Amino acid sequence: MLEDALKGDLNNKALVFAIYCSQFWLSPFSSQEQGGCFEQGESLIADWKLFKKLLQKKEFSVDGADYENIVYSFKKGIFSAALEKYGKSPDENDSRMRAEICRKKGLCYKKLGSYETALSCLTEANETLGGQAAVLAEMADCYALCGETKYAKLLFREAFFTDAQRIDLDFLDAPLITVLVEQVEQKGYAGAEKLEWIPVYGVLLGVFGVKRELRSQEVLRLKQDIYSLESELKDPANNSAVLTPRLMNLYFWLIDHYVLSKDSVAKINEVLLKIKILDPAVYQMYVK
């Protein structure tokens, strides 16, 4: 249909772009009968990430409004199709699978602009299987998109504290987090390093400024993790580029615990000294 329309309007760049997008999605949709419903949904989500990366690499001389409208139309179609697939996926009384299906349905609803419904799905995922960094990050993104900045900052910080490597930045849309990611990228970080530096700069730049007190078991675990990372950093064989920011973030959490629990200044100064030794530049930004 688009190609027929183009014959009568050969200079229509929007039509050319729409045809390019359609050609990309011919293959994914033609192979949708393979695998179960969940796998088909996963395939669509993965293809969307690839599609977005291709659009970023290729320059199109299309009017901005036309470009956005065409991309939005495809986004609506793809995530509606993926949502339908996830909705038909059996969880087989498996709590982990049920939580994952709820998370992916929440992601689809969020991409379709239904933030309250997305939050409902993500909350169910979190209640079904708690402590998942990916779920917390998606919930934070929804809160940010709804204007609930306080909850967003708290949950983003929680998500990166839980496991930064499990967070998929490609599906986070709120300026609160995307601007922070861009700032970290501008400092030259990428891949696994970038994910670990995001919470560090989130604190340094005031984005992750909402804090909570830790439970006694969490404090014990935090101190154990710090000791373990400090030991790992002493081994040259380990990846210090990833371990350093991860340890830095844990130091920040420990200082927050000491401050909120009104612990001794000596303990705070001890951690500050460790930060200064680990990265003097970060220390200067943190204490200024």
Image (cartoon, helix red, strand yellow):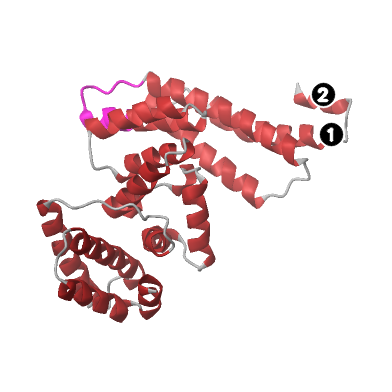
The part of the chain drawn in magenta is: 89-101
Q: Residue 6 or 270: which is nearer the viewer?
A: 270
Residue position marked by numbered label 2 in the rendering: 5
Q: Nearer the viewer, mark 2 or mark 1?
A: 1
The mark that comes first in sequence, 2 or 1, is 2
Residue position marked by numbered label 1 in the rendering: 12
Amino acid type of disc 2? Answer: Ala
Q: Residue 54 or 285: which is nearer the viewer?
A: 285
Please tell me whether residue 81 is drawn above or below residue 171 in the rendered image: above
Q: Residue 229 or 4: which is nearer the viewer?
A: 229
Query: How far apart are labels 2 and 1 at the CA level?
Result: 9 Å
Q: Are marks 2 and 1 in contact (CB under 8 Å)?
A: yes
Task: Report whether residue 140 is seen.
Answer: yes
Q: Is residue 199 left or right of residue 58?
A: left
Kind of element beneath mark 1: loop
> As drawn, which residue projects farthest toward the top?
88
